[in-house]
Image (cartoon, rainbow, N blue to C red):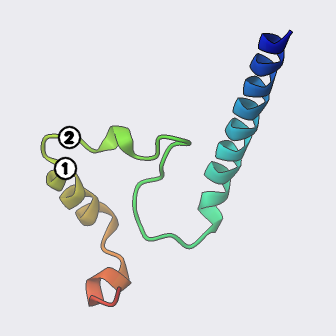
């Protein structure tokens, strides 16, 4: 009985986390974020950036999407 309750609670939390991730993913288009590729829910852009030479991926993103104005001016 206790195991069933634990599994049901875990399933409910997983369901709510999934709904939240999908909601955030859809809402991202309306917010003012810096330019860049659109991330996937939960994992973001993890699959788009290689581990070996990440600077090359960031350079390509910069050429494709431009730089953020605040970073370009140096005002953090």
Note whether 37 is above or below 31 in the view shown: above
Is residue 15 left or right of 41 when viewed as pictured? right
Is residue 46 left or right of 61 when viewed as pictured? right
Disc 1 + disc 2, Cβ < 8 Å: yes
Residue 66, quarter of the rendered image: bottom left
At x 40%, y 61%, the residue is 36
The percent position of residue 60, horizontal first and vertical second, equals: 22, 56
The percent position of residue 62, horizontal first and vertical second, equals: 26, 65
Q: In the rendering, which numbered label is found on residue 20?
A: none
Note whether 4 is above or below 58 in the view shown: above
Q: CA distance from mark 1 to mark 2?
A: 6 Å
Is residue 3 left or right of 26 when viewed as pictured? right
Q: Nearer the viewer, residue 16 or 48?
A: 16
Q: Nearer the viewer, residue 27 or 52?
A: 52
Q: Nearer the viewer, residue 39 or 17?
A: 17
Residue 5, quarter of the rendered image: top right
Neighbourhood count class around disc 2 (C-alpha, 10 Å): few under 14, some 14–19, many 20 upward: few
At x 32%, y 42%, the residue is 48
Q: In the rendering, which numbered label is found on residue 54?
A: 1
Q: Classify the position of the C terminus by image quarter.
A: bottom left
Secondary structure found at label 1: helix
Residue marked by disc 2? 51
At x 69%, y 39%, the residue is 17
Q: Looking at the image, which residue sits at the far top?
A: 1
Neighbourhood count class around disc 1 (C-alpha, 10 Å): few under 14, some 14–19, many 20 upward: few
At x 28%, y 90%, the residue is 73
The percent position of residue 39, horizontal first and vertical second, equals: 48, 49
Note whether 45 is above or below 15 in the view shown: below
Note whether 2 is above or below 44 in the view shown: above
The percent position of residue 75, horizontal first and vertical second, equals: 33, 90
């Amino acid at each position: 009985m206790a195991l069933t309750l634990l599994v049901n609670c875990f399933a409910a939390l997983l369901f709510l986390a999934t709904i939240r991730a999908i909601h955030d993913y859809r809402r991202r288009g309306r917010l003012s974020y810096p330019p860049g590729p659109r991330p996937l829910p939960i994992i973001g852009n993890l699959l788009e950036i290689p581990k070996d030479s990440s600077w090359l991926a960031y350079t390509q993103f910069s050429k494709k999407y431009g730089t953020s104005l605040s970073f370009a001016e140096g005002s953090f």
